[in-house]
Amino acid sequence: MSQESRPSKISENLPQIRSVVLVALGSNRPSAWGDPRETLQRAVSQVGSKIGVIRALSGLYRTPAFPAGSGPDFVNAALAAETALSPGEVLSALHAIEADAGRERNVRWSARGLDLDLIAAGDLVLPDPETHEEWRDLTLEDQMKRVPETLILPHPRMQERAFVLVPLCDVAPDWVHPVSGRSVSEMCAGLPQGALDEVQKLHSALVKPQKGA
């Protein structure tokens, strides 16, 4: 029996496809929203309202600025959020939140009131494995000179950075890197002890926004 071609409205009733994104947060100078802790708390609330539901939120950590000597110590954190947005839309939303806090993107890796990095979106590798490998293998000198023209996921430097991995261990220790096959906790354990010792947990903590807040 032949089927008639007709517009279908089934897709209108399907639930949105949602994914979990991992975001690293940092601040090492006052922003339009206040001191670093106040800034990160406001940023978490903005992520909850503009991107999706915050599923997990790390503690706060004090870490040296990267590269060394580039500014005051950072206050860092990480979160996992469930979202229906595409990775590109998430990145745009993060940049908009940074701008609301007064960030201007003039000098790379300078002191900043708010830094929001999209670390991963589920198990996506963007834009493709070959480009990801190219950026993952850049020397520090090239990292300081080059800026990608497209979104690279997972973040090509995440496996090297204690200030990213230690907070991520609070929120997604079992997330597995889709290229290396290593979990967050495994990548963290593989870092030099000296790098881990530089990440100091603070007594204060961020508050996860209530759903719908």
Image (cartoon, rainbow, N blue to C red):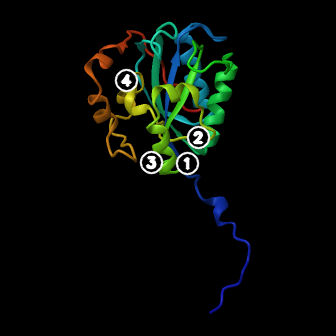
The CA distance from mark 3 to mark 4 is 21 Å
N-terminal label among 2 and 3: 3
Residue at the spot of label 3: 123
Image spot of residue 101 (x, y percent): 66, 17
Secondary structure state at the residue bearing disc 4: helix
* Mark 3 in CB contact with mark 4 (< 8 angstroms): no
Comes first in the chain, label 1 or label 2: 1
Q: In which quarter of the image is the C terminus?
A: top right
Q: Distance between the residues labelled 2 and 3?
A: 14 Å
Spatial CA span between label 4 and label 2: 22 Å
Q: Is residue 99 left or right of residue 58?
A: right
| Secondary structure at numbered mark 2 | loop
Q: Crowding at label 2, few (<14), some or many (≥20) Cα neighbours within 10 Å?
A: some
* Residue hosting label 2: 151
Comes first in the chain, label 3 or label 4: 3
- Counting from the top left corner in percent of width and height, residue 81 is at 50, 36
- Is 159 left or right of 37, judged from the image as shown? left
Amino acid type at circle 1 is: Pro
